[in-house]
Image: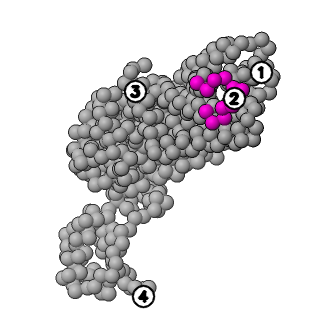
Amino acid sequence: MTHRLIVQRALSAGSPAGGVPVTLALPPGLHAILGTPTDGTTSIAELVGGMARPRAGQVLVAGREPYREPSLRARIGVTLAPPSLPDVGTVERLLRICMETRGGDARAMLERLGLAPLATRRITSLTPDEARAVELAIALATPNPLVLALTEPFANTAGADRGAVTEAMQHAAAAGAAVLAMTASVADAADLGGQVHLFERGVVTRTLSSLAVAELPGSEAALRVTTNDPRALAAALTDLETVRSVTWDEARGLSFVTVRGPDLDRVGFAVARAAQRAGARIYAIQSITPGLEEVRAAASGLALAAYHAAYRHGSGTPMTAPPAQPGPRASEASS
Amino acid sequence: MTSSSLLFGLQLGQRRITRARVLLAALAIVGFAAAVALAERQLDLLGSASRSLQGGAFGFIVPLATLGAVGLVLGNESVAAATTPLARFGISRRPLAFGLTAGALATASALAAAIAFTTALCAHDPWAPPLGQDLLSSTWIGALVGAAYAGLYSFGATFGRRGGGRGFVFLFDFVFGASGSALSVFAPRAHALHLLGGEPPLDGMSQGASAVVLAVMTVAGVAATLARCPR
């Protein structure tokens, strides 16, 4: 398998990971990197985009170093968690500079994302979300991309059209780019439909298919509803097709109903309809997002269960790989 | 090195310095230089022009003000990091760095010239050369010295994650600039003092040679900055 992107125990100066060496080798295609900036996702974006010189290790895109080669950087699209746009005046001017220097139509991409009005704004007047959206449009418009390294491409992007973002990422992956979506959201990772890599302290600890990701906590939307009549609300919710599971809890003085479904909007709408039908009063609605530790633990459990199930059924060959050995850690690198 | 990349670098630097608060800070620095010169004149009229120029203005205010100007243009980062916001889109860092350094040079040069002009004007005494001549020579010396500082500070800013090397250049100049040792030949301050009528950094060195050394420092500083900047 040809790896388009190789990051070998690379350390990025000033990364929030605080010196965690990042190791990664990815072929062309769509990859969701499930992790947080403290695991090194920001370092990946900085290093792969040639924005930071690796203090140690090696970063290769198609066999060359992005930090040292402008022509290579022109074919890499990057977005960071805190956006980093140069103050060259208006967004329009920045888009023109990008089009002049490396081609691609960033202006058209901004329109496709439904953010055309941002073009006339001054860069210094953009909110962080709007700046992230502009950065995303520029990254997605990268001509003949080798790598797209996008940090949280679906979150805090000033209402950029999610479908258009997914489509552009899938199109780049189909054209031979290694498309990385760095995210802490299991639902976003599952939605992309590519491989999902659990990333922990600089290394990929497990790689899952999008089907396997559907088994993880957080892969579907969940709402926790505080109500006066949980049984009636739960009963009303079970009749609705959009609802996949309902549980209730009356034990702690307050009554909660937990509802799961395909996405937050539809689950929220279902809760509203059910409450109206059951005559239940709703005091609060809260979205439930599992922590990455919970997700990692569930992934380990699922892999272990599949491994044991394969042997128990006598095939002798595990259905999935046994739990992966952890990769190199910061402690090893420093020793 | 494309002209458009160079222009982008210049614009990047220009946007960082053309702000109201930067202009106010520059005016405050020039005002401070004027206040020091007036105080010197008040203290003792005899030789106040020389004392103000060689002491407060070129001994302390110009090195610090030009350090601030270079820091402002580079955004208090290393030269490579200052170019990254545009270099990430595939533009070579070198023309961008050249644009930024040129901006730093122009800013530092203008600021140093303004400080020198104001000091010469406010501290002028009857024993100094005629006012017009004194203002003219002080101004071009200021411009040349400012450019030399900017070149060396830019080179210093290629060292360290945040370009902290320029602080080392400042310290070197501050320590050796008026020391009279052979090392002072590498300090812009020593040549500035010589051009203003002080002792030469090396025995027998002419004022013309000091001016040439300052010009060489400027060019060498910029060239070394570009050489150390990655593509």
Q: Are marks 3 and 4 on the same chain?
A: no
Q: Amino acid at mark 4?
A: Gly
Q: Quadrant of the N terminus of chain A?
A: top left
Between marks 3 and 1 in the image, the one whose residue lies nearer the viewer = 1
Q: Is residue A205 shown to the viewer in this render?
A: no
Q: Amino acid at mark 2?
A: Pro
Please identify the residue farthest to the front as the structure is shown. B126
Badge 1: residue crowd in 10 Å (few <14, some 14–19, many ≥20): some
Give the residues in magenta.
Answer: B121-132
Task: Say which residue appears at 28% left-offset and 55% top-offset.
Answer: A159
Badge 3: residue crowd in 10 Å (few <14, some 14–19, many ≥20): some
Task: Say which residue appears at 59% left-offset and 34% top-offset.
Answer: B118
Residue pointed to by mark 4? A253
Q: Nearer the viewer, residue A35 or B142?
A: B142
Q: Amino acid at mark 1?
A: Glu
Q: Amino acid at mark 3?
A: Leu
* Residue B214 percent coordinates (x, y): 63, 19
The chain ID associated with circle 4 is A
Between marks 4 and 1 in the image, the one whose residue lies nearer the viewer = 1
Tell me the distance, in whole angstroms, between the alpha carbons under discs 3 and 4: 67 Å
Q: Are marks 3 and 4 in contact (CB under 8 Å)?
A: no
The chain ID associated with circle 3 is B
